[in-house]
Image (tube, rainbow, N blue to C red):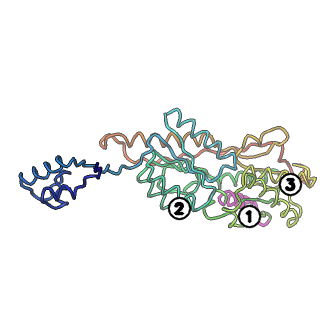
Amino acid sequence: MNCKKVTSTDVAKKAGVSQSTVSMILNKKYNVSFSRETIERVEHAAKELGYKNEKKLPKTRISMRGTIFVICPNLTNPYYFSLLQGIEMTAQKNKYDVFLCNTRRDYQTEEKYLRKIEKLNPSGIIYTCSPSFPEIVRNLSQKIPMVHIGEKDAMKGMDTVELNSEKIGHMLAEYLLRLGHKRAAFLSTPLTQRQSARRARIKGFCKAFEEAGYGDYVYIKSLPEEMDTLFQGVDMEYKTGYELTGKVLQEVPNLTAIVGSNDMVALGIRDALLDRHYKIPDEISVLGCDNLLISGMHGIDLSTVEHFTGKKGEDACKILIEKIEEKKLPKGKQSGEMIHHIEYEPRLIIRGSSGYPKNVI
């Protein structure tokens, strides 16, 4: 028994026409006129031969509607867990799923996610850090609703839940100056161009000391820039504080305070001092930023800055969902492109890791 598949070429031979004529007639694509006789001849030949016209399904755009993509630089700092918790809680209340994209601060991984996200076409995107590819992100935000959680003015023209790190740095320095500290160090993870929050925090800290006339007594120490993508262990920020503390103690005599760029760095500073038998805060005060849960635990008592991380995640998701729902409305009923900017006033949390320097009564 001959089971050979009948092709459009077979139909063309039987009907005495070209293969392209068969294709156009059977697919109803009449780019040229055909006589009634030719159409009937082709259709009859196809039926007699048992030809099956298997139409190719049109390519459809993959869609992940109902899903919010969250771009995160790492999961080694509980700060990002607080953000994610706020985002997920709000998303779930509004029947949206959350898909996490952890870039690990790797440029290629971040770019790959951005390219794939456009193809996957989710309902919206939340960026929890300063983008490494701002132009790609801006273009993407024109197609898919997007909200940025990050440094003030880092992504102009975009809906942003803002972090004013310069104000936070200034606040930490003013507090130390009020206590009588005049010689302080600020330790940080790498200060690359994309780490705008870290650099702004240091800027505010140094500015306050300069205004008080002690600008020459502030010591900034950070990891090399190339370590921004290489140094990605779970304890990366803690190790930064621990290792840089050992170096700054050797290089700078008579320090009375050391500040970490965040709480995880500050916890490393704390342990490095305790391992060297320094008394905190009697000999050296320690401060951080973020007010992580662990920072307030008994025995740690880290002085820090609260800037309402979880609430930022909630508000970013609320703004994004408003944008998504707005986009669903008919053109005439949309209220227009309103840009949201939300900024929380940071609050100093004073605990047992900070106090007056020993030479001040």
Picture disc at residue 133: 2
* Side (left or right) of 189 relative to 299: left
Please name the residue that numbered disc 1 is placed on: 223
Residue located 25% across and 55% down the image: 7
Badge 1 crowding class, 10 Å Cα cut-off, few under 14, some 14 to 19, many 20 or more, is: some
SS at circle 1: loop
Q: Which amino acid does label 2 sit on?
A: Phe
Residue 207 in magenta stretch: yes
Q: Which x, y percent locates residue 99?
A: 54, 44
Q: Gap between marks 2 and 1, in whole Å?
A: 23 Å
Q: What residue type is labelled 1?
A: Leu
Q: Gap between marks 1 and 3, in whole Å?
A: 16 Å
Residue 306, image quadrant: top right
Badge 2 crowding class, 10 Å Cα cut-off, few under 14, some 14 to 19, many 20 or more, is: few
Picture disc at residue 121: none
Residue 336 in magenta stretch: no
Please name the residue that numbered disc 3 is placed on: 272
